[in-house]
Amino acid sequence: MSHTLPLKEISDVTHDTRRLTFDRPRDFEFQPGQATELTLMRDGWRDEGRPFTMVSMPGEPLLEFVIKIYPEHDGVTEQIATLTPGENVTLSDPFGAITDHGPGTFVAGGAGITPFIALLRSRARTDGAEDCHLIFANKAERDIILREDWEAMPGLRTTFVTDAQDDLPDGPVDRDFLDGHVGPDTPHLYICGPQGLVDAVRDAAKSLGVPEDRIVTEEGW
């Protein structure tokens, strides 16, 4: 089933990230961390649906997305950056394997943070984020999406990693980096980002003793 919705509002989150909001259809139900295929109702783009994660809470009146823009790709996100209120998009039924399996360590790379936005917000509102650690890797400090939100979230431990020469820890998020952060006692390890990061973190975590059935990615358990 698909839903056609007019854009309600678009605003900046970072220099290359936009927030999109829509009125949520009453029958559009999802779990924190899940995504939908979003398609622009523009000529030439109606067959170019892409998966994007809902960052609002289930049951809220507004449906919200945080989308990183890649103008160099000359693709869907570049078009999204030029949307104006009132333009229509269609959304598919929600899907995705990254849902709340319990507290743990969350490793995100760039736009891979989006499934964790709703998931960690939900945990903070219900069970709390005291047993959660967010490791968030980006190219530079200015690329960190919602940094102030993460730092203000009660109980959440944060580690921001960049490739730039700044005051933050250097990447990559490899076995040496993860040693001491994850291990056999890690309750759950959530990973989302570029496939290279997901594969590297998964392999490193396994070698550090994290049980495979506690690793959550979009590929499933």
Image (tube, rainbow, N blue to C red):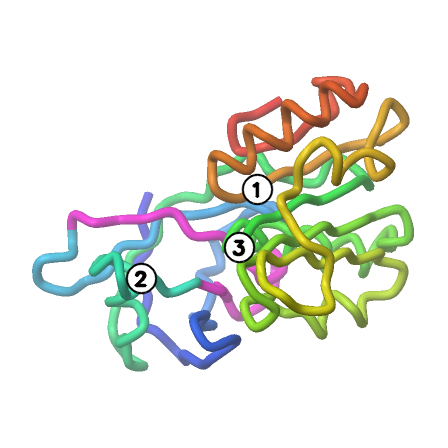
Q: Secondary structure at mark 1?
A: strand
Residue identified by numbered label 3: 110
Q: Secondary structure at mark 3?
A: helix
Distance from the alpha carbon under mark 2 to that under mark 1: 19 Å
Q: Which mark is residue 144?
A: none
- Residue at position x 53%, y 33% in the image: 218
Magenta range is 47-67
Image marks 1 and 3: residues in contact by CB distance under 8 Å? no
Q: At label 2, which amino acid type do we have?
A: Thr
Check if residue 49 falls in the magenta segment: yes
Q: Quadrant of the C terminus?
A: top right
Depth check, front residue: 48 or 9: 48
Distance from the alpha carbon under mark 1 to that under mark 3: 9 Å
> Where in the figure is residue 162, as x and y percent of width and height?
62, 58
Residue identified by numbered label 1: 192
> Where in the figure is residue 12, as x and y percent of width and height?
47, 80
Is residue 21 visible in this depiction of the protein?
Answer: no
Depth check, front residue: 95 or 19: 19
Which numbered disc flags the more N-terminal residue, 1 or 3? 3
Check if residue 101 falls in the magenta segment: no
- Residue at position x 61%, y 69% in the image: 141
Nearer the observer: mark 3 or 2; the answer is 3
Distance from the alpha carbon under mark 3 to that under mark 2: 14 Å
Which numbered disc flags the more N-terminal residue, 3 or 2? 2
Label 2: few (<14), some (14–19) or many (≥20) C-alpha neighbours in 10 Å: some
Q: At label 1, which amino acid type do we have?
A: Cys
The answer to whether 37 appears left or right of 199 in the picture is left
